[in-house]
Image (tube, helix red, strand yellow):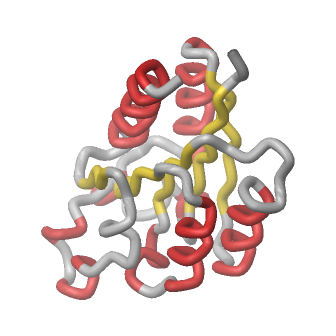
């Protein structure tokens, strides 16, 4: 059995977690989330590849590099596209080309915020969307993949 690989992709401003608007996003840092998720993934025999960028093209390039341009593509993606949720057809197209299951995660409840945040270019392609549960949403997404991989060998 080969080791499964999941990419954890975080979009713009998420490198500021723990400092930026903690009343909305909490006090947990992105590094805290990545370390915790990497440990959980490792315990489940999954390799977690973490990536964060404030630049749309860098995310598109990363998705290509872990997918169609890779000899050993990832088996799934957990993505918090952040502000790109509402604007990026390019990242949507890259994920569609990857043709692997992905879960969209948001720390805040985007439906309880400004009206423009309710539209996502990703939700209709995602196997699931988790929002409003803070950093626990990432752990829930990983839990889904652990179960999915155990039943889809």
- Left or right: 54 in relation to 23: right
How many numbered marks does the figure carry?
Answer: 0
Asked if residue 150 is positioned above or below residue 148 in the image, the reply reads above
Q: Position of residue 89 (x, y in %)?
A: 50, 85
Residue found at the very far front of the displayed protein: 153
Q: Residue at x 27, y 81 (%)?
A: 119
Q: Position of residue 20 (x, y in %)?
A: 46, 63
Asked if residue 43 is positioned above or below residue 146 in the image, the reply reads above
| Image quarter of the N terminus | top right
Q: Residue at x 38, y 59 (%)?
A: 126
Asked if residue 64 is positioned above or below residue 17 in the image, the reply reads below
Q: Residue at x 61, y 72 (%)?
A: 94
Residue 22 seen in the current view: no
- Left or right: 108 in relation to 144: left
Quadrant in the picture for residue 144:
top left
Residue 68 seen in the current view: yes
Quadrant in the picture for residue 108:
bottom left
Q: Position of residue 41 (x, y in %)?
A: 57, 24
Q: Residue at x 72, y 56 (%)?
A: 67
Q: Position of residue 46 (x, y in %)?
A: 62, 24
């Amino acid at each position: 059995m080969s080791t499964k690989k999941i990419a954890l992709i975080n979009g713009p401003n998420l490198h500021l977690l723990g400092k930026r608007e903690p009343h909305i996003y909490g006090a947990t840092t992105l590094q805290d989330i990545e370390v915790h998720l990497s440990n959980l993934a490792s315990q489940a025999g999954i390799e977690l590849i973490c990536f964060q960028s404030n630049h749309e093209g860098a995310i598109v390039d990363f998705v290509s590099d872990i997918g169609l341009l890779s000899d050993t593509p990832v088996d799934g993606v957990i993505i918090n596209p952040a502000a790109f949720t509402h604007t990026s057809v390019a990242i949507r197209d890259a994920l569609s080309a990857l043709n692997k299951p992905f879960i969209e995660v948001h720390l805040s409840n985007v439906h309880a915020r400004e009206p423009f945040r309710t539209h996502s270019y990703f939700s209709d392609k995602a196997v699931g969307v988790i929002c409003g549960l803070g950093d626990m949403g990432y752990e829930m997404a990983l839990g889904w993949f652990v179960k999915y991989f155990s039943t889809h060998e």
